[in-house]
């Protein structure tokens, strides 16, 4: 995918599939403002630059760890989140550049 061209149709389909699950969509909404949405959880690293620990996403969602791991992998494959390892924990933050590309592609093509 070229930066100027934006996501191809197949990539958009993957994005829509990833966001078509209510729990994954909710996680993306939470990650939009991690300071507000994860205030109940002591941060392991800076949430704005590194992201939210997967254990905090799991705790807030109430879903099984394996389910959350699967959901985050789906969001990562679609390019919607960026993972960062901090010690033994993976943190996730939204890929704002990708989300902007997707929004432009929707505006242009749909």
Image (cartoon, rainbow, N blue to C red):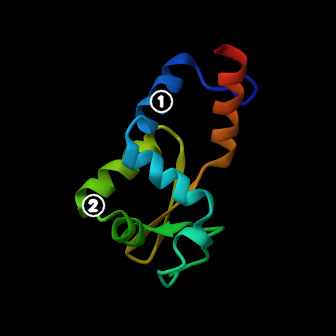
Q: Secondary structure at mark 1?
A: helix
Residue that label 2 marks: 63
Which residue is outermost to the top? 109
Which residue is outermost to the bottom? 42
* Residue 107, above or below 99: above
Check contact, mark 2 vs mark 1: CB within 8 A: no
x, y percent for residue 79:
53, 41
Answer with left or right where residue 60 lies relative to residue 12.
left
x, y percent for residue 62:
30, 65
Mark 2: give few (<14), some (14-19) or many (20+) Cα within 10 Å: few
* Residue 88 occupies quadrant: bottom left
Mark 1: give few (<14), some (14-19) or many (20+) Cα within 10 Å: few
x, y percent for residue 106:
65, 23
Rounded to the nearest whole Å, what is the CA distance between mark 2 and mark 1? 21 Å
Residue that label 1 marks: 16
Question: Between disc 2 and disc 1, whose residue precedes?
Answer: 1
Residue sitting nearer the eye, 86 or 101: 101
* Residue 108, above or below 70: above
Dividing the image into 4 quarters, which one contains the C terminus?
A: top right
Residue drawn 42% across the image and 37% down it: 18
x, y percent for residue 82:
54, 53
* Residue 75 occupies quadrant: top left
Residue drawn 51% across the image and 51% down it: 28
Q: Secondary structure at mark 2?
A: loop
Answer with left or right where residue 86 lies relative to residue 64.
right
* Residue 98, above or below 84: above
Residue sitting nearer the eye, 18 or 26: 26
């Amino acid at each position: 995918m070229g930066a100027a061209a934006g996501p191809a149709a197949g990539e958009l389909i993957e994005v829509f599939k990833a966001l078509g699950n209510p729990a994954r969509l909710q996680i993306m909404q939470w990650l939009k403002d991690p300071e507000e949405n994860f205030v109940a959880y002591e941060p392991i690293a800076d949430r704005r630059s590194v992201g939210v620990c997967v254990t905090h996403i799991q705790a807030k969602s109430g879903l099984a760890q394996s389910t959350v791991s699967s959901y985050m992998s789906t969001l990562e494959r679609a390019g919607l989140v960026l993972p960062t390892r901090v010690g033994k924990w993976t943190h996730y933050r939204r890929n704002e550049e990708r989300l902007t590309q997707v929004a432009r592609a929707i505006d242009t093509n749909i």
